[in-house]
Amino acid sequence: MHIAWLGKKTPFCGNVTYGREVTNALLDRGHQVSFIHFAQEEDTLAENRAECQEVPIPFLYKSQIYTIPSFKSSKVLTKALQELKPDLVHASLTLSPLDFLLPEICEELGLPLVATFHPPFDRKRRNLTSGTQHLMYQLYAPFLANYSQVIVFSKIQRDLLIRLGVPQSRVAIIPNGVDAEKYSPGFSKLKSQINAQRVFVYQGRIAIEKNVESLLRAWKQAEMGKDSKLVIVGNGAIAPALMNTYGADLGIVWMGFVADEQQRIQILRGADVFILPSLVEGLSLSLLEAMSCGVACLATDAGADGEVLEEGAGIVLSTQRVSTQLQTLLPMFQDHPELTTLLGRKARQRVLDRYTLTQNITQLEDLYRQVLKQQHVYSSTSV
């Protein structure tokens, strides 16, 4: 089938990874994919696979979190869909005003519309950040009710959208998936490169909602010693301020944004522990990648991350008093390598059981066929 994928290519974030991995997997299975995304025409990326047609949509502003389209973006999108004639449209929602216009555009063109709804959340409104994210769900719910299907990553998200008025029949749970062959345990030179015997890693945006400062504060207070290093992979607006306060003298290694995927895999393979202290989350691909590499994982119960690690696949933290919890746990994981080895094996097995990209794509193909069948029935009864 021909899928018009409306998603994101820059700046780097989980949505970008999701779009790349899923569309490449769809191409591998013989589907036709047209990738529509916000970009200036001259910025269209040459790295796209030759068989994937790329269509730029003009914008005024975009960030890792949201996008402001230009005034003509809806017309450009409508024209592109008319020319492409896809079987269906899949929007990996970029949090832009265009998201709200998509049902109307696709209805006029007779195209079924699938959405993946990414916004992070906390299962309880325990802080200002999680309350703000809950408002995002309230804002989107009336519009998502007009999509053919809405994909979310967990039961918690599904139940929340249903409570907010999205019909249960239109909400599908398809968790994020990771390529378990690519992200796998293996040899790494990381420890020799940074002169460490034990390595703890955070990978993601350096933003308020990611709560990285709680991890850094716990690391400083735990006095981990010279043989242990905390590696921070990623960038963001608050990174410079944190770097000034928490530096190399504390055993903290700031690597910044690492674009090369193989280098990121090498970092994970060299890690003993992966830590995700977020206040809000969806279903973290970074967490799944670390688990798939056989790394012991600690994450808050924000979003679906606690669901991923439940029943012994990792350590689940509360989003409240993260620093206090980590101050106790960090030395324990430093002093007991047998614990990290055991949890790393369990994390890898959890991914193999529930979160592989292969399983994800099979579920997605089934959903596409279901949506197309429903569209065919609707078209037949409307004639």
Image (cartoon, grey):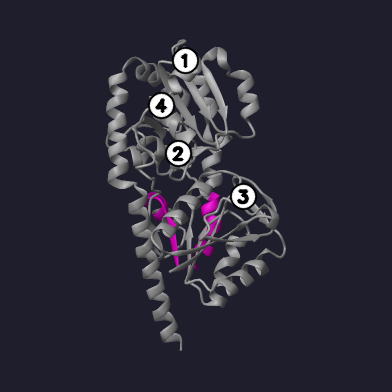
Question: Could you say which disc has been placed on residue 66 in the image?
Answer: 3
Question: Could you say which disc has been placed on residue 188 in the image?
Answer: 4
The residue tagged 2 is: 286
Given this view, does label 1 or label 3 mark the residue nearer the observer? 1
The residue at the point 72 percent across, 63 percent down is 71
Disc nearer the start of the sequence (2/3)? 3
The correct choice, above or below, for 178 with respect to 231 in the image is below
Q: Give coordinates of residue 159: x percent, y percent.
A: 39, 54
Residue 157 in sight: yes
The image quadrant where one finds the N terminus is bottom left
Q: Amino acid at mark 4?
A: Ser
As measured in the structure, the alpha-carbon distance from the residue carrying label 4 to the one carrying label 2 is 18 Å
User: Which range is magenta?
Assistant: 135-158
Q: Count neighbours of disc 2 (C-alpha within 10 A) and say few if under 14, some if 14 to 19, many if 20 or more.
A: some
Disc nearer the start of the sequence (4/1)? 4
Q: Count neighbours of disc 1 (C-alpha within 10 A) and say few if under 14, some if 14 to 19, many if 20 or more.
A: some
Q: Count neighbours of disc 3 (C-alpha within 10 A) and say few if under 14, some if 14 to 19, many if 20 or more.
A: few
The correct choice, above or below, for 241 with respect to 116 in the image is above
